Image (spheres, rainbow, N blue to C red):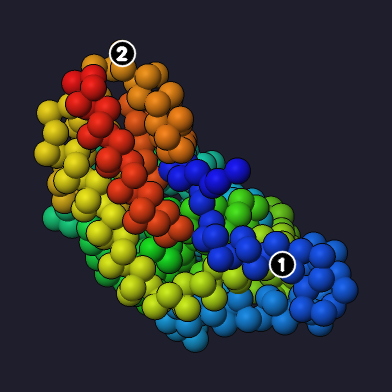
Amino acid sequence: MSRIFNFSAGPAMLPEAVLQQARDEMLDWQGSGMSVMEMSHRGKEFMGIASRAEADLRELLAVPDNYKVLFLQGGASSQFGMVPMNLTRSNRKVDYLNTGSWSKKAIAEAKRFCEVKLAASTEESKFTRTPSQEQLELSGDAAYVHYTPNETIQGVEFPYIPDTGEVPLVADFSSTLLSRPLDVSRYGVIYAGAQKNIGPAGLTLVIVREDLIGEPIDGTPVMFQYRTHTESGSMYNTPPTYAWYLAGLVFQWLKANGGLAAMAEVNERKAKALYAAIDNSDFYANPVELNSRSWMNVPFTLADAALDARFLEEAGAAGLMTLKGHRSVGGMRASIYNAMPEAGVKALIDFMADFERRHG
């Protein structure tokens, strides 16, 4: 069976080279006589895998020395609670930017632990844009400012890094981390679920500035404390070892293919081509303002929603899968993360043009 082009928002495609290497090492990792899934997380074999993965990630992102890199579980959703639990012991006031479905979930969770101020919200526009820097009403004395650089459901992406002055900036980078270079030093905390550009579901990356690890609020469970994981090298309990290993293979693949600068060029080309196909058509439309469009998640609608089911059926028959938009917004959505080749985007564009000729 030939592989499809999987446009899922996550779990998403992985690079074929990574899957092939994992296949070849499945039963016997580099002469150890065992699978990575069978290794002790404290054994020398896996400790070597873990150490290289962290070193490669630090190299790719140029992570400064005063930041800790954690390989955790619980998804980005667990960080919705861990961030306020770890960063608000001495100051319970925080600022959040509300720009889509994942921002709203982060805000709802933070309200359980602290006083949340909405420094910006684009809900009135149905989350079809990001606020400009000038529109941010920042407190100035908040414990941190939180935002979601890319909203996977609405397909909205910040074209800039918010300037928060001396207040630490916290970001949910689940859908864009490793898709392009990033100035980590602009952030206090970066977190990301792995299942977009990093690896398989089950792993969560957290990059946290050392001075923010500090003391969590009273009653914070040991497993939800950043210091627990920094002090144990992410080995306080059994980590998601196989997902960690696969993420390490992805890091190696990124380095072998030119790093994040090269990946950014490819991702920008893919997004520009797909948006051009949509904008040059009277049959397809994208609701997001031009300067807020996501490189990673491209939602679009058909002129006649009654054709949605047929579009999905015919796309599936052509090997173009998981294009149905999120149930909260409808329409279609093409997620074109790092592992989606340009050939996949071209195949989608060609199919869209053919479908329009036949049904437009």
Q: Amino acid at mark 1?
A: Asp
Q: Which residue is mark 2?
A: 306
Q: Amino acid at mark 2?
A: Ala
Q: Residue at x 40, y 26 (%)?
A: 314
Position in image of residue 174 (x %, y %)? 46, 54
Q: Is residue 317 above or below residue 105?
A: above
Name the outermost residue toward the right.
Answer: 33
Tell me if I can see residue 12 in this picture. yes
Q: Residue at x 77, y 78 (%)?
A: 30
Question: The residue tagged with tag 1: helix, strand or loop?
Answer: helix
Q: Is residue 57 left or right of residue 31?
A: left
**CB under 8 Å between callouts 1 and 2?**
no
Q: Is residue 266 above or below residue 136?
A: below
Point out the tag, 1 or 2, that comes first from the N-terminus.
Answer: 1
Q: Is residue 313 left or right of residue 53?
A: left
Q: How many marks?
A: 2
Q: Residue at x 21, y 45 (%)?
A: 275
Position in image of residue 101 (x %, y %)? 40, 37
Position in image of residue 150 (x %, y %)? 35, 51
Query: Which quadrant would the N terminus be assigned to in this image?
Result: top right
Image depth: mark 1 or mark 2 in front: 1
Q: Which residue is mark 1?
A: 24
Tell me if I can see residue 102 in this picture. no
Q: Residue at x 39, y 78 (%)?
A: 258
Name the outermost residue toward the top.
Answer: 306
Q: Is residue 165 left or right of residue 339?
A: left
Query: Which quadrant would the C terminus be assigned to in this image?
Result: top left
